[in-house]
């Protein structure tokens, strides 16, 4: 009691929470742009009307229509599908269900999505990394050597922010080396842009495989907060033990079911085709800019671009209200910015802003003099 008044809120907090770097986003950092190309959102809002009105009642924990429709869409059984508050909640549920804080570890391969480590660190689980090879393929021997104590491996394919698919043979190798030891979660947040690459068909062979999906990207519903975890029924049943009793609000379930109707799926597929065309066009246009060093091939709704002076590019565009995602700090991605596909008009505004920037061949000299306005980790 006597020293209670000396206890600051900070010192009362868990140590790992005090030391946590939260997920950074331009919105959180207070950016006030009008061309948002930083979060891989779709640039135009789809229109929905609510049909459910029973707001006096708690919602279903796992809304039946949403589960039925997603299972049909994914080619799986209903008991192989869990719906949650975005794929981010799926990432966290897996750690909570499988990892003992202070004992077990997760493993992932940077450069990649930032929430695996944020979730692990929040829960007090070690986040171990095995850097991808220079060509962004998995370093299989290094992964094998790092598996001691690892309960959960996250692999993002297509990978955010690099845009490439992970070689399916390498995914199989990871699944073989982890059999009976760890769960492998393949993050397919962008799989609608390359549906033939999905590994959901492998669930029959691998009881420890999990696939993560979202409505935030190709379905254009980032504001809905709705995602899916796909796995065999035994694993899904385990996640049901740790999920909140009412993870989705009634309006979310209502809109998700509409977006997964036959018509909703047709709209999504048309959107994917249109964005593919935008991606080819933007790739060609970017390659003509002096300040662009390299445009990486992408299977997704964003492009990773290496600039001759990325900090200058980032700041120049930021000051004009065009917000990109700085990837400079990720291993192997010096000079790289990630650009989400906006409307043609938004892309053109960005190109117009890039056009006057010179192609300085002194990237390293400039990098030593960073003045980026953000410290985004990914
Ligand atoms: C956007 C994204 C997610 C998160 O999806 P939400 O459903 O919006 O939580 C997960 N993984 C990757 C790789 C993403 O890019």
Image (tube, rainbow, N blue to C red):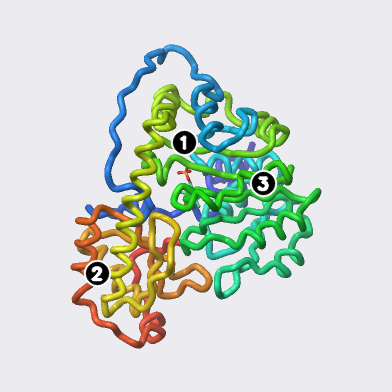
Q: Nearer the viewer, residue 356 or 80?
A: 80
Residue holding disc 2: 316
Instruction: Specify few, some or many for label 1: CA neighbours under 10 Å numbering under 14, 14-19, or 20 or more.
Output: many
- Of badges 2 and 1, nearer the viewer stands 1
Residue 262 found in image quarter: top left
Identified at 64% across, 29% down, the residue is: 79
Identified at 29% across, 78% down, the residue is: 291
Provide the secondary structure element on which disc 2 rests: helix
Residue holding disc 3: 202
Q: Earlier in the sequence, mark 2 or mark 3?
A: 3
Whether label 1 lies within 8 Å of ligand 1 gets the answer: yes
Whether label 2 lies within 8 Å of ligand 1 gets the answer: no
Instruction: Specify few, some or many for label 2: CA neighbours under 10 Å numbering under 14, 14-19, or 20 or more.
Output: some
- Of badges 2 and 3, nearer the viewer stands 3
**Considering the image in quadrants, where does the N terminus appear?**
top right
Q: Nearer the viewer, residue 3 or 13?
A: 13
Residue 347 found in image quarter: bottom left
Residue holding disc 1: 226
Q: Nearer the viewer, residue 119 or 332?
A: 332
Identified at 30% across, 69% down, the residue is: 284
């Amino acid at each position: 009691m006597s020293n209670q008044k000396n206890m600051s809120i900070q010192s009362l907090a868990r140590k790992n929470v005090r030391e946590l770097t939260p997920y950074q986003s331009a919105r959180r950092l207070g950016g006030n742009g009008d061309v948002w190309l930083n979060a891989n959102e779709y640039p135009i809002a789809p229109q929905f009307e609510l049909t459910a009105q029973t707001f006096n009642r708690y919602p279903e924990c796992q809304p039946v229509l949403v589960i039925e429709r997603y299972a049909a869409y994914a080619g799986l059984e209903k008991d192989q599908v869990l719906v949650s508050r975005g794929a981010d909640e799926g990432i966290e549920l897996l750690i909570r269900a499988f990892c003992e804080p202070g004992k077990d570890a997760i493993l992932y391969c940077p450069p990649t999505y930032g929430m695996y480590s944020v979730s692990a660190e929040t829960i007090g689980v070690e986040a171990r990394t095995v850097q991808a090879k220079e060509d962004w393929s998995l370093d299989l021997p290094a992964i094998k050597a790092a598996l001691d104590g690892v309960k959960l491996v996250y692999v993002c394919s297509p990978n955010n922010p690099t845009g490439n698919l992970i070689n399916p043979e390498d995914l199989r190798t990871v699944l073989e080396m982890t059999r009976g030891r760890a769960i492998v979660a393949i993050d397919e947040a962008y799989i609608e842009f390359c549906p033939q690459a999905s590994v959901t068909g492998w669930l029959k062979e691998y009881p420890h495989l999990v696939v993560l999906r979202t409505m935030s990207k190709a379905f254009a519903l980032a504001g809905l907060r709705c995602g899916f975890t796909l796995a065999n029924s035994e694993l899904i049943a385990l996640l049901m033990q740790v999920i909140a009793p009412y993870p989705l609000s009634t309006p979310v379930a209502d809109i998700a079911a509409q977006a997964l109707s036959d018509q909703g799926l047709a709209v999504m597929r048309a959107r994917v085709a249109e964005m593919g065309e935008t991606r080819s066009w933007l790739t060609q246009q970017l390659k003509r800019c002096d300040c662009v060093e390299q445009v990486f091939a992408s299977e997704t709704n964003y492009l990773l671009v290496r600039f001759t002076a990325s900090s200058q590019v980032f700041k120049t565009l930021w000051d004009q209200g065009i917000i990109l995602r700085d990837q400079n700090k990720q291993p192997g991605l010096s000079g790289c910015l990630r650009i989400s596909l906006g409307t043609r008009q938004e892309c053109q505004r960005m190109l117009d802003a890039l056009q006057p920037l010179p192609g300085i061949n002194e990237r390293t000299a400039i990098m030593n003099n960073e003045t980026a306005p953000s410290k985004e980790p990914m």
